[in-house]
Amino acid sequence: DVKVTQSSRYLVKRTGEKVFLECVQDMDHENMFWYRQDPGLGLRLIYFSYDVKMKEKGDIPEGYSVSREKKERFSLILESASTNQTSMYLCASRSWKWGDTYYGYTFGSGTRLTVV
Amino acid sequence: SQQGEEDPQALSIQEGENATMNCSYKTSINNLQWYRQNSGRGLVHLILIRSNEREKHSGRLRVTLDTSKKSSSLLITASRAADTASYFCATDEYGNKLVFGAGTILRVKS
């Protein structure tokens, strides 16, 4: 089975800290994504990456950056954590093949981040 | 941006009954997907239906897609207590990213 592993289930950080959320997938997937999930708002896309060294802004990139130095790892960085970044963060990956082939996403278990 | 809108927001049924959830969206899509999320966990992919398909089955799941109405439905037949979860539709737009709705909370009572 494809596995997407997020390094922490729960994380508590202080306002102003730089926070790293790590995500690793083991199936050589090209595409990787970071979402945040908040009650009543569903999942919102923060950043995504088509392939290694590539990154694209999603719908809510402000206050975040990402790094994808290796194909299997996609890191989300909160440059200076704020209380409004308290949320559940979900990483996902997907294989991408040219042509008429579409695949579902595989999600990690999520990281619940609390900024105090 | 939130593309899919699920209806109802919450649904409570007895074990053995069928559960139907609906999803509406706004733009053209490559495909539409349904996901399940158990409390506090990541999402699990259930089923994908392409824009040129009208109906798809997977076990106790049946998904329909009406691109003229920009809507989809997910039917879970003979529901079980283990089906209790949140269900999300997600539209795969051109540009290679999924856009999720706010979800339907399903509770199956035993």
Image (cartoon, helix red, strand yellow):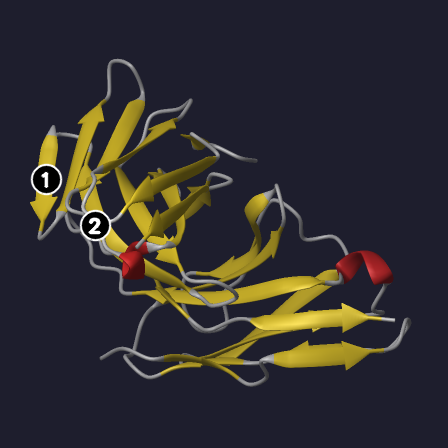
Percent of width and height locating residue A28:
29, 78
What residue lies at 90% left-to-right and 71% top-to-bottom?
Answer: A15
Percent of width and height locating residue A25:
38, 80
What residue lies at 61% left-to-right and 41% top-to-bottom?
Answer: A40
Residue type of the residue flagged with mark 2: Ile
Q: Earlier in the sequence, mark 2 or mark 1?
A: 2
| Residue for badge 2 | B47
In the displayed structure image, the side of residue A114 where residue B79 appears, left or right: left
Q: CA distance from mark 2 to mark 1?
A: 8 Å
Residue type of the residue flagged with mark 1: Lys
Secondary structure under the numbered disc 2 in the rendered image? strand
What residue lies at 40% left-to-right and 37% top-to-bottom?
Answer: B11
Work out which residue is located at the far top of the displayed protein and give it. B68
Q: Residues within 10 Å of mark 1 (few under 14, many from 20)?
A: some
Say which quarter of the image contains residue B14. Answer: top left
Task: Indicate whether A44 appears above or below A65.
Answer: above
Task: Indicate whether B62 appears above or below B97.
Answer: above
Percent of width and height locating residue B65:
20, 28
Task: Indicate whether A44 appears above or below A112.
Answer: above
Mark 2 on the same chain as mark 1: yes
The label on residue B56 is 1
The chain under label 2 reads B
Front in this rendered view, residue B45 or B87:
B87
Query: Cβ–Cβ below 8 Å for labels 2 and 1?
Result: yes
Task: Indicate whether A67 appears above or below B103.
Answer: below
Q: Is residue B53 visible?
A: no
Front in this rendered view, residue A80 or A89:
A89
In the displayed structure image, the side of residue B43 where residue A111 appears, left or right: right
Q: Is residue A69 visible?
A: yes
Secondary structure under the numbered disc 1 in the rendered image? strand
Quadrant holding the C terminus of chain A: bottom right
